[in-house]
Amino acid sequence: MGLEMVEVMSETVPTVVPAAARENGVDIYPLSRYYFGARDAAGVPRGLETAADRALRLKANFAAHGLRTSVHGVLLVELFDHPHVLLLQVRNSSFLLPGGRLRPGEEEVRGLKRKLSSKLSVVDDAETVEEEDWQIGQCIGMWWRSEFEAIPFPYMPPRFRAAKECMKLFLIRLPMSRQFIVPRNMKLLAVPLSQIHGNAQVYGPIVAGIPSLLSKFSFNVISD
């Protein structure tokens, strides 16, 4: 009778996945399926520049090109049956999403692919970015700065005279397996969403807000 009951239920109550759920479904694969390596860092690491040098650089770029636009990727993996986000750590202190500033006139998706390759791949050349199989998903959030070193806001406050920087977060759909090759001056860490949620003191407001931005997605956590 048990088998008959299962058969009847499958006929009378078919499983229907709403279109919205399919669109917002995200497969998350185990961390153990990914390979992590290191390579020499090219050029002068930005994470090691002084605050004064960074401020001068940002002011010069703003004077030359106007609003600074940066793009960052949110990459998710599974560990202990819980979603983790991959973060770059600089100087054993600050935590960053992989990504960076777009070049003047550069398209967002191409620019993000270039930045992901420079931070997470053996490829460190803008000319070969098309060879990288980064699956860029939808933009899940935008943040704004009124000044170069100001705290970012997820909206444009009325008191803003002119925004200096716009930061966009994109969901990256990872394949079942992949290798990540990180510059030696950085570390790539898998941090649980439960740990970064609301923890702006440690991770900053952008990273700490990621769990809320991901709340509209349905996670399909695939364990080994």
Image (spheres, rainbow, N blue to C red):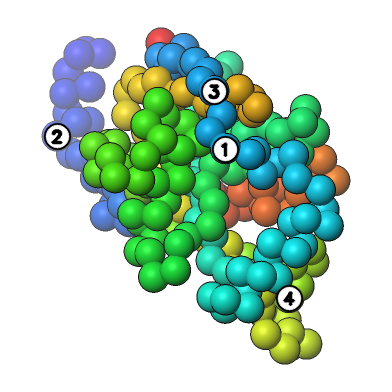
Residue 146: mark: 4
Nearest the eye: 88 or 24: 88
Query: Mark 3, residues whose alpha carbon is within 10 Å: few (<14), some, or many (≥20)?
Result: few
Of the image marks 3 and 2, the number of the one nearer the N terminus: 2
Q: What's the residue at 47%, 23% (across, down)?
A: 181
Q: What is the CA distance from the residue labelled 2 to the residue labelled 1?
A: 63 Å
Q: What is the CA distance from the residue labelled 4 to the residue labelled 1?
A: 29 Å
- The residue that disc 2 covers is 11
Of the image marks 4 and 3, the number of the one nearer the N terminus: 3
| Residue 67 vertical placement versus 22 (above, below) | below
Query: Mark 1, residues whose alpha carbon is within 10 Å: few (<14), some, or many (≥20)?
Result: few
Q: What is the CA distance from the residue labelled 1 to the residue labelled 3?
A: 9 Å
- Mark 2, secondary structure of its residue: helix
Of the image marks 2 and 1, the number of the one nearer the N terminus: 2
Dot in front, 2 or 1: 1
Q: Judge whether residue 204 can be spotted in this image.
A: yes
What amino acid is at disc 1?
Answer: Gly
- Mark 4, secondary structure of its residue: loop
What amino acid is at disc 4?
Answer: Ser
